[in-house]
Amino acid sequence: MKRLIVRLSAACVALWGLAVACTDGQPPLTDYVNPLLGTATLWDSADLGYTPTRRAWGAEVFPGASLPNAMVQLSPVTLFRSGSGYQYEDTVIYAFTHTNKGHWNLCHVPLLPVTGAVSPTDYASAYSHAKEEAKAGYYRVFLERYGVDAELTATLRCAYHRYSFTNGAEKKLLADLSVSNERVRDRAIAQDGQHAFAGFQQTGEKIYFYAVANHAILSIDSLREGRRAISIVRFANDDSRAPLELKIGFSFVSIANAKENLALEIAAKTFADVRREASDTWEALLSKIQVEGGTLRQRQLFYSCLYRSFLWPALRSDANGEFTDASGTVVNKGFRYYTDPSFWDDYRNKLVLLGMLSPSVAVDVIRSITDKGEHRGFMPTFFHGDHASVFVAGAYLRGLRGFDVERAYALLLRNATVESRSRPHLNEYMEKGFISEPDLDQPVTETVANAGVTKTLEYAYDDYAVALLAKALHDTANYRMLMARTTNYKNLFDPTTGLMRGRLANGDWIPKFDPCYPYYEYMYREANAWQSSFFAPHDVEGLIGLYPSRDDFERQLDSLFSIPWKGYEAHNFTCFIGQYCHGNQPDHNFPFLYYFVGKQEKSQALLDTLLDHFYGMGEHGLALAGMDDAGEMSAWYVFNALGFYPFSPADAAYIVSVPLFDKATVALDDHVRFTVRKQTTGKKIRSITYNNHPLDGYFITHDKLKEGKELVVE
């Protein structure tokens, strides 16, 4: 942010894993984690902001077992092709699947223990939350139809199932490889010796599996009904009292690699061993932030959100280092290969948190997207915008090393200068300084057009991020070129409304303009004018300068947070303060804007309300204000509870607010810990000191935090 942020030097930043230890009388931090948080749906109109006629999208998270940024996410499915596949209000379980993100995709290799007669169209089992348990790295549920107590845990690349059948029932396993949250293109399953079976399922990706059972396999039978076909694995029942245990290795390379992953990660370990190791892994990560004070509910929300922030991106390379690259070639390049982050969502905060607490993962994610970019010609993007630029620039400026920054920068610069799927309408943006919109007679929420306002604003910020990297790499010419484009957001400011408004190709304003009406992809991307018009995190002073006075800007902010939502029902628009929507990402840094007009306490009042009311919502206290979007909603809570937030994530600095907790200690990888302490209570910040020295303004640089001193907010 111009005139507000001091740039970081090129120092390495990473966080080190603490030993798992608890002080006397304190529970392990994993006890605060509830993986069911975010699985419930909001139905109350007072919460949603409208009267629902259908199920609103919840956080779309999964409650099952996984490790941080693992290949395997082992979780129940209550409804296929429904977000993560699990909704708390559902009453049946169809299967346990092994990959998950929460975005209507994945859910590979569905398995379910069964007894008696089943058919391809009738095999789901009822279950009750009274007999369901979810913890970090562990999930358990009782399947009422089959009388099976199912327990699940996992390693990075393997799943461990334990099924306790009642009354000595015949042990069978149903595999429905014809379904997932994506269209299944191909699949196979076959027995491999007395105790093992293997196969694959291909959707967009091809995932291989190799499973070893503790009971002998009698046969694998196929049942077909119309187009539906399932496989039934029948096991010997020599010891009817012994649970059926399945150890399953996975790979996106081959069955042989899946088998090797299984041998290396589980081998002869017991279920208890794997569960304990999973819990210990999470404890080590969670222990990187220790909080003191606050209520039990606040600690539960904090550590549940911290947990939720580290489930994506997901590992795709095997224990031997091999992975299938973007060209379909099996390679080993000496780093862990990951899926793309959900850039449009989590570049705002979650990827910053990833770099702080798991720097080696963040580095390998950058190496992964660079590898993909060099195969495709452009750096990967996700959904909208070009925010790998913000992630890479912010990570580099915070001191992360270990990736080839020149190669990454070359791709980011190409994204910013050559029109492609990564940056649609880039030529018009470069020529006119904005992206136009067609004049449509009756656009509706679902209208698909250019989303020109959102693209223009986001491209301007992405240009800023690439410019920062250009400056750090001494590419002065491109730095100047890109910085000249960072003010393009101003070209869509309509002074008659005080809002960002779409323009026609000839430069005229879109004539039909309702700033409160939400669109998915017309002028705005998943937003209305109010939720879009204040996005210039790199140049807030320039944004304020578009208004007649700072008082006018403040009054416009007051309108943002006070004009009531008009009752529109649309996916991704849930939970409001005025027009501000916390259920979706585009306006998530807007509450801080009062800082820039000398009214920090008004920002804090909003932050306190959001932290208190928009997490742990609903009848069961298990809903979030909106989609978690691969951890972005959760990371927002983590940062703001700690009292510092990456207002402009491309910049290596944080805006300071009043912490939720009395004290928080954050451990850095270079054996440095910094603390954040709150003195007294209230919303008005009287002073901010770091190492007993007053802070100049409200921002603290990442370099300062790396000094390992105490940040005190009074």
Image: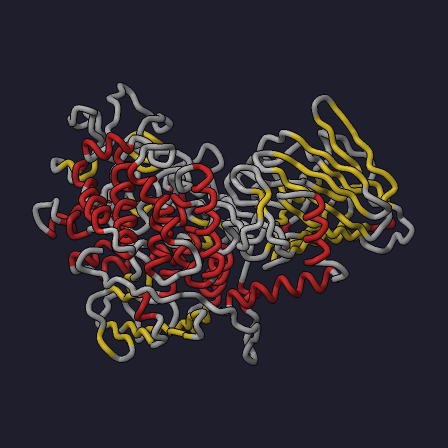
Tell me if 515 is positioned left or right of 65 in this view: left
- Whether residue 546 is visible here, answered yes or no, is yes
Residue at the (61%, 64%) spot, across then down = 279
Q: Is residue 340 above or below residue 593?
A: above
Q: Is residue 466 above or below residue 416?
A: below
- Whether residue 613 is visible here, answered yes or no, is no
Q: Which of 314 and 419 is in front in this view?
A: 419
Q: Nearer the viewer, residue 594 or 298?
A: 594
Q: Is residue 509 above or below residue 594?
A: above
Instruction: Report the residue that reaches farthest toward the top.
Output: 441
Residue at the (15%, 40%) spot, across then down = 498
Residue 378 coordinates in the image, percent (x, y): 39, 39
Residue 91 coordinates in the image, percent (x, y): 63, 41
Q: Which of 39 and 1 is in front in this view?
A: 1
Residue 579 coordinates in the image, percent (x, y): 28, 42
Tell me if 118 is positioned left or right of 525 in this view: right
